[in-house]
Image: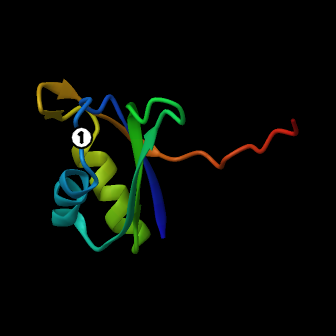
Amino acid sequence: MKNIFVGNLEPDATEAALRFLFQPYGAVKRVSLVRDRESGQLKGFGFVEMRIEADGDRAISELNGKEAAGRVLDVHAARPRIHQKK
């Protein structure tokens, strides 16, 4: 499985649109958009999990720097989340 970061998304991006963008490269397991907790507004990035790592690598290669909805996408392998103690 490949977890992919997708940045510079349009303010009205949808999970369905992001899934549609990645489906030509292989099976998409999960799509999630990151929203502000208080306002609910999209923060401009999200994550796509692809079932097969090679498909994810190809999607990254093909989609990074591609224009979508007037914005140049920032697409790369997601870094592991670092949990901070509060």
Location of residue 75 (image quadrant): top left
The residue under the point 32% across, 28% down is 8
The picture places residue 22, in percent across and down from the top left corner, at 23, 58
Question: Residue at label 1?
Answer: 13
Q: Secondary structure at mark 1?
A: loop
Residue 32 vertical placement versus 52 (above, below):
above
Quadrant including the C terminus:
top right
Pick the front one: 72 or 84? 84
The picture places residue 54, in percent across and down from the top left corner, at 37, 67
Direction from residue 29 to residue 14 in the image, left or right: left
Location of residue 55 (image quadrant): bottom left
Q: Outermost residue, front direction?
A: 38
Pick the front one: 12 or 72? 12
Q: For the residue carrying disc 1, how many other residues have a C-alpha within 10 Å: few (<14), some (14-19), or many (20+)?
A: some
Number of numbered labels in the structure image: 1
The residue under the point 65% across, 49% down is 80
